[in-house]
Image (cartoon, helix red, strand yellow):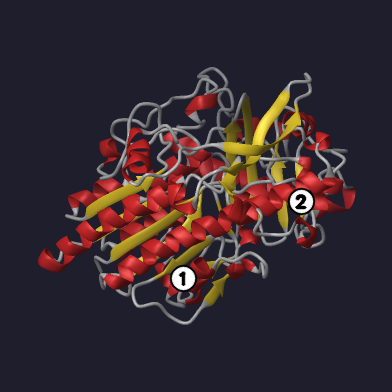
């Protein structure tokens, strides 16, 4: 196959901000056009709703418990901070297959290593948000006589201790040409021109990823985008009615940390409006890259991917950002695949994750997709075939700010969440899509709950995720058929 690949990736991106996912207000014509020639996955998930572990899973094709890079290094809670030296990565596999391999933008995989250590061309950029003090960005501003980064109209809540809360949004006093997003697109276009020239002269294929740091909060964007959408046109998420009754206490603590209750309704609507503006800004910058790919004659014969590392609450469940709350708002993400040449638009209901993107990249490049250990190629699905497919997804979380182990099972109708430190959760995603009512203890769901517990337990054991040890003694998951204590003196008697 050995197709060229253009890969677009955003950070903390809700699926309900895109036209191809049903939003008829937010302007996302570029991403919608990609979806109109490809497959939009409706049940597409991040393997874990936190940047570094999710990005490491995309890079490696391995679930977080397996690659063990489990936390953002800025908030590391004692886990490893670099991938193992012998860890498989799709980028190294592509490079070995004589691909040009580039990544422009957010890296955020490990503490010290950059994309150069994993066979990517590009500009090393550490950190969780736009590094506006980056030397190349500052040189770009100076070269084009553009004004420096400056903020006004900051929006913050108030922390429980009375100090100013995290910056959530602000007006950026720069023209669009000075934004970091525009700068990233410029650098991606520069690399694309070189790759396209090499492809024309030698036939050498390329993989080029553009990873935007947004629309991750804070939503710091120029006035044109900051004021693009009228807050009065916005309905707050239904789950702002969250009371945290019968929910793990950590959720109320996170709500306090993000100071949701210190913001007015008008401010919350303005934050969503700014978030939408940020999405449109990024869509436009992706459009600039797409236009150049078409100009260079490499767009039609390229595979196109679009996804995000995880979602964002934007007030849902009285929360912002992400964290130890396993809601669809942060676990469901955009997932769009367009194979070379495109096809009529289709919507797939197959359960898929970022790790399947890894397998699909390998497949499109003519390589063994099984190297993505925990993923499956989406190519047969995109081609309209009916391959054997999973009926559910196992997701995981390991902590942010503090250790917090969770495992989740998502099915067509239910979500089961295991929280060893407090209470478990069970949501009916059909009757309660906003996940307001925890039904784990409801007696009428006992048979369903136990079946889900068994399904999760079995899958954890099969994949070697040692979280299953906790479930062995705590839940009705079957007979004790192995040595629970891992000791030699306590053998199972038969």
Q: Position of residue 359 (x, y in %)?
A: 38, 56
User: Outermost residue toward the front?
Assistant: 145
- Frontmost of labels 1 and 2 is 2
Mark 1 is surrounded, within 10 Å at the Cα level, by few (under 14), some (14 to 19) or many (20 or more) other residues, namely many
Q: Position of residue 196 (x, y in %)?
A: 22, 63
Circles 1 and 2: CB distance less than 8 Å? Answer: no
Image side of residue 142 versus residue 73, left or right: left
Q: Is residue 9 above or below residue 324?
A: below
| Corner quadrant of residue 414 | bottom right
Instruction: Return the disc, 1 or 2, that comes first in the chain's sequence.
Output: 1
Residue at mark 1 to residue at mark 2: CA–CA distance: 29 Å
Mark 2 is surrounded, within 10 Å at the Cα level, by few (under 14), some (14 to 19) or many (20 or more) other residues, namely many
| Corner quadrant of residue 440 | top right
In the image, 39 versus 211, the foreground residue is: 211
Q: Position of residue 55 (x, y in %)?
A: 45, 43
Identify the residue at image location x=38%, y=42%. Answer: 141
Identify the residue at image location x=79%, y=54%. Answer: 236
Q: Position of residue 322 (x, y in %)?
A: 64, 40
Identify the residue at image location x=78%, y=51%. Answer: 435
Image side of residue 251 versus residue 178, left or right: right
User: Outermost residue toward the left?
Assistant: 202
Q: The residue tagged with tag 1: helix, strand or loop?
A: helix
Q: The residue tagged with tag 2: helix, strand or loop?
A: helix
Residue under circle 1?
Answer: 34
Residue under circle 2?
Answer: 269
Q: Is residue 153 above or below residue 239?
A: above
Mark linked to residue 298? none
Identify the residue at image location x=78%, y=20%. Answer: 162
Quadrant position of the N terminus in the picture: bottom left
């Amino acid at each position: 196959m050995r197709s060229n690949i253009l890969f677009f990736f955003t950070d903390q991106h809700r699926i309900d901000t895109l036209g191809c996912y049903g939003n008829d207000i937010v302007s996302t014509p570029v991403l919608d056009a990609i979806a109109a020639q490809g497959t939009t996955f409706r049940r597409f998930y991040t393997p874990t709703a936190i940047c570094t572990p999710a990005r490491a899973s995309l890079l490696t094709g391995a679930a977080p418990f397996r690659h063990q890079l489990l936390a953002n290094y800025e908030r590391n809670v004692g886990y490893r901070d670099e991938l193992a030296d012998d860890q498989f990565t799709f980028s190294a596999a592509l490079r070995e297959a004589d691909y040009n391999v580039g990544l422009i933008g957010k890296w955020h995989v490990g503490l010290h290593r950059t994309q150069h250590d994993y066979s990517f061309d590009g500009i090393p950029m550490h950190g969780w948000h736009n590094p506006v003090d980056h030397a190349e960005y500052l040189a770009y501003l100076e070269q084009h006589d553009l004004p420096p980064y400056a903020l006004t109209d900051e929006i913050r809540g108030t922390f429980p201790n009375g100090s100013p809360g995290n910056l959530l949004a602000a007006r950026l006093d720069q023209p669009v040409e000075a934004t970091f997003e525009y700068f990233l697109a410029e650098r991606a276009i520069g690399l694309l021109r070189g790759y396209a020239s090499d492809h024309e002269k030698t036939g050498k294929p390329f993989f080029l990823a553009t990873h935007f740091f947004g629309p991750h909060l804070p939503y710091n964007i120029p006035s044109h985008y900051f004021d693009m959408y009228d807050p009065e046109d916005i309905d707050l998420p239904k789950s702002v009615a969250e009371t945290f009754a019968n929910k793990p206490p950590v959720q109320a603590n996170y709500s306090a940390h993000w100071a949701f209750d210190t913001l007015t309704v008008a401010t919350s609507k303005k934050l969503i409006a700014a978030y939408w503006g940020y999405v449109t800004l990024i869509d436009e910058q992706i459009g600039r890259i797409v236009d150049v790919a078409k100009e260079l004659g490499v767009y039609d014969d390229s595979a196109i991917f679009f996804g995000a590392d995880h979602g964002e609450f934007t007030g849902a469940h009285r929360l912002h950002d992400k964290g130890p709350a396993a809601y669809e708002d942060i676990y469901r993400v955009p997932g769009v695949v367009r194979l070379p040449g495109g096809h009529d638009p289709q919507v797939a209901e197959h359960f898929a994750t970022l790790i399947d993107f890894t397998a699909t990249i390998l497949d499109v490049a003519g390589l063994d997709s099984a190297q993505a250990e925990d993923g499956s190629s989406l190519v047969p699905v995109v081609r309209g075939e009916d391959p054997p497919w999973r009926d559910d997804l196992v997701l995981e979380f390991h902590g942010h700010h503090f250790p917090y182990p969770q495992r989740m099972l998502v099915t067509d109708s239910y979500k089961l969440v295991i929280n060893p430190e407090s209470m478990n959760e069970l949501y009916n995603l059909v009757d309660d899509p906003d996940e307001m009512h925890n039904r784990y203890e409801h007696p009428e769901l006992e048979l369903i709950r136990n079946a889900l517990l068994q399904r999760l337990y079995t899958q954890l054991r099969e994949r070697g995720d040692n979280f299953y040890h906790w479930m062995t003694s705590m839940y009705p998951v079957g007979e004790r058929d192995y040595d629970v204590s891992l000791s030699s003196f306590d053998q199972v008697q038969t």
